[in-house]
Image (cartoon, helix red, strand yellow):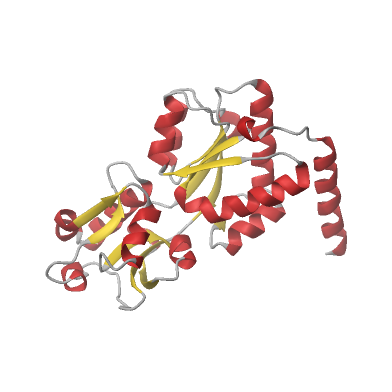
């Protein structure tokens, strides 16, 4: 254990000594909103270790992918699903060799902390009873937000999509759906487990069965449109995101690490 720890920190110091300093504007990461807390924490440690300054733009994966397609200057993209990474790959806007499935997550049903509920999610689940006569369900817009797509798949598996669809509050990101529950504006939302864990104003009513929706996977890849020096900086950051220190941060925030160091 001591030898492994020593080897790790020697590698970090060597990395820091050889990496050139890159201005913040030259190392921009487009990342899914659900990664906000973890990426900001990792960004601080990366800057301290290497001198390079990553700048994070965090929003719905669909929004970020379309911005990259429109010419936005990003060097690294981390999506909350494979579809939006595929979208960029089909347009030759990422470096295929750098693409990696970085993280995993879980899907949960949350209610306000001051009105906690505990339910069992199985086929035949009575969503209408949970929401009440006028209550609505918040989640990412299933037409383009990954969390919403996972939610639609899960509700379809439960047999509840027909009830949910007309009562859905479609948000532009999972964080926006979570905020509606925290403020008590809706009685329930479907969000990622990591976001629920970071929120003080919600109660996890249930975790969706893994078989109810496609696996929640966060792929990462270097964007192919930048200058060579920018793409090289992005490759270094991507390597750091797969390192032991970064993996520890991701696990602390509740993510499953799919590419262990």
**Residue in the image at 32% along x and 65% along y:** 181
Please name whichever residue, 24 or 160, is drawn nearer the observer in this view of the structure: 24
Instruction: Work out whether residue 233 or residue 243 is closer to the camera in this orientation and state it.
Output: 233
Pick the front one: 22 or 1:
22
User: In the image, residue 78 lies at what x, y percent?
Assistant: 52, 41
**At 70% from the left edge and 51% from the top edge, which residue is drawn?**
45
x 69%, y 24%: residue: 229
54 relative to 180 in the view: left or right: right
- Residue under the point 70% across and 55% down: 245
On screen, residue 204 above or below 30? below
Is residue 110 visible to the viewer in this orientation of the structure? yes
The percent coordinates of residue 156 (x first, y second) are: 23, 56
Q: Horizontal and vertical percent for residue 19? A: 78, 35
Q: Which quadrant of the structure image shows residue 16?
A: top right
**Where residue 115 sits: x, y (%)?**
30, 78
- Looking at the rendered image, the quarter that the N terminus falls into is bottom right
Residue 261 in view: no
Horizontal side, residue 30 vs residue 160: left or right: right
Q: Quadrant of residue 81?
A: top left
Count numbered badges in the picture: 0
Image height of 30 relative to 163, above or below: above
């Amino acid at each position: 254990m001591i030898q492994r720890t020593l080897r790790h920190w020697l590698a970090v110091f060597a990395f820091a000594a050889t990496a050139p300093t890159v201005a913040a504007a030259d190392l921009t990461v487009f990342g899914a909103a659900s990664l906000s807390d973890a990426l900001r924490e990792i960004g601080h440690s990366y800057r301290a270790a290497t001198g390079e300054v990553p700048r994070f733009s965090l929003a719905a994966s669909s929004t970020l992918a379309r911005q990259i397609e429109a010419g936005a200057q990003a060097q690294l993209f981390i999506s909350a699903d494979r579809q939006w990474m595929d979208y960029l790959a089909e347009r030759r806007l990422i470096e295929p060799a750098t693409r990696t499935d970085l993280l995993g997550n879980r899907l949960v049903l949350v209610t306000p902390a001051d009105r906690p509920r505990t339910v069992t999610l199985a086929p035949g689940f009575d969503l209408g009873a949970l929401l009440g006569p006028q209550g609505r369900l918040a989640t990412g817009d299933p037409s383009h937000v990954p969390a919403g797509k996972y939610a639609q798949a899960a509700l379809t598996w439960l047999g509840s999509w027909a009830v949910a669809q007309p009562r859905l509050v479609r948000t532009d990101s999972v964080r926006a759906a979570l905020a509606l529950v925290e403020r008590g504006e809706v009685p329930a939302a479907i969000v990622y487990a990591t976001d629920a864990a970071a929120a003080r104003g919600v109660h996890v009513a249930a975790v969706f069965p893994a078989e109810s929706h496609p696996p929640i996977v966060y792929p990462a890849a270097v964007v192919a449109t930048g200058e060579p020096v920018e793409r090289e900086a992005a490759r270094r950051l991507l390597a750091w995101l797969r390192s032991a220190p970064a993996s520890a941060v991701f696990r602390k925030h509740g993510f499953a690490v799919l590419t262990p160091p």
